[in-house]
Amino acid sequence: MCYALSVSAYAVQGCNAPDGAQVSGITYNGATIGWPAVQGASGYELRWKPSSGSIWTNVSGHTTTTYSLAGLDPVTSYDVQVRSVCPGGGTQGGTSAYGTLVTFTTLAAPCEVAPPIRVAFKVMLDGPYRAQTGLMVDSLRTKGLLPLQEPYTALGYSLTGGASTTSPVLAVTGPNAIVDWVVVELRDPGTYTVVEARAGLLQRDGDVVALDGTSPLGFCSAAGSYRVAVRHRNHLGCMTGVAYALSSTPVSIDLSQPATGTYGTNARKANGGLMNLWSGNVMANGFVSYTGTDNDRDPILNAIGGVSPTNTVVAYSLADVNLDGSVVYTGNGNDRDLILSNIGGTVPTLTVPQQLP
């Protein structure tokens, strides 16, 4: 505690430091420290530094007995000390000596913050792609239909962790505007089994980014060789033809380029010099079909009411094949013609099968 000697000015001549800080709430980038109150102290000063360094960060003018450190490096040892401040000056300049040195180590950053694997993935969807601009339309975003929460868990997909984004991310315009959610899978290079699946955001220029709208998509699996597959809720999925060595340094994989090999036969659709994922998988069953059982045309008619084919519905829907935010069965911009065109346009019984093992 602070104490005073009986002198003419009754000035504070010195003051005892707290015994030492107690550290709690340690995370990967910060920690909460606390110390016992000193009776008569007007405040406290503290300092901390990496244990391996010599430069202290100092805090003065602090009046409570707890303080939160932030911006620390993960898995790093830090030293912290606290001293008390007494009013009236004194032989120690109004402060005590620093208390006991306390050392703590921050935790490892979670994989979502420092993923062992990052992929700079790129893909184009046939439905919203416009060859004249080389971009996809972001009508779902501009109409306010894009959900903040990924839609795939509700559709029965098994994802590693849920995913949600924020309104500011969906407010971005231009080539980096968000078109829709996609799922990217890491697959075993030999058995093709899914090792990890993450939801990401697809930009108009084809980049698949993390939930912040800018960073490459990250995965928690250990660095290594994987095939990479992508899925969209009403397009056919596609997988790389070879495995890629993936690590925390982003690897570029561009499925929109014809030179990028893919698994299977006819896995993508050529369009304006680029390759697109096949649109029209309204039933989400791995086939694009126009007639027969579980065809993709009938759900479009059902979505607009099933009676009047000229009706339209504004919705975030599997039946919205071109992703313009409206389900349309006949007329300009209808969703049915894309399905017929993709199966060949002349023989309505043909199908396009998804090329995923």
Image: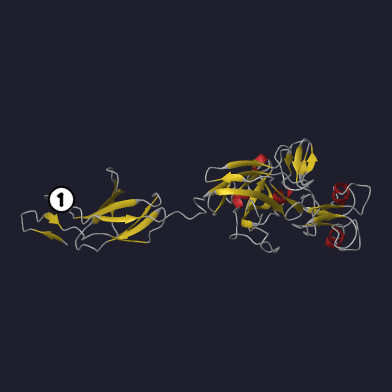
Amino acid carrying mark 1 in the image: Gly
- Mark 1 element type: loop
Residue that lies at the very extreme toward the right in this rendered image: 346
Q: Which residue is mark 1?
A: 89
Q: Position of residue 193 (x, y in %)?
A: 65, 57
* Quadrant showing the N terminus: bottom left
Residue 332, visible in the rendered structure: no
29 left or right of 229 in image: left
Q: Quadrant of the C terminus?
A: bottom right
Q: Residue at x 89, y 46 (%)?
A: 344
Q: Nearer the viewer, residue 247 or 167?
A: 247
Q: Residue furthest front?
A: 190
Along the viewing direction, whichever of 49 and 165 lies nearer the viewer: 49
Residue farthest left in this picture: 7
Instruction: Say whether residue 9 is visible.
Output: yes
Residue 275 location, quadrant? top right
Nearer to the camera, 244 or 97: 244
137 to the left or right of 290: left
Point 25% across, 53% down: residue: 81
Q: Is residue 280 left or right of residue 187?
A: right
- In depth, the one of 283 and 86 nearer the eye is 283
Residue 125, compared with residue 4, is above or below; it is above
Is residue 317 left or right of 251 when viewed as pictured? right
Instruction: Pinpoint residue 238: horizontal percent, then vertical percent.
Output: 72, 49
Around disc 1, counting alpha carbons within 10 Å, would you say few (fewer than 14), some (14 to 19), or many (20 or more)?
A: some
Residue 112 lies, in percent from the top left, at 52, 54
Count the marks: 1
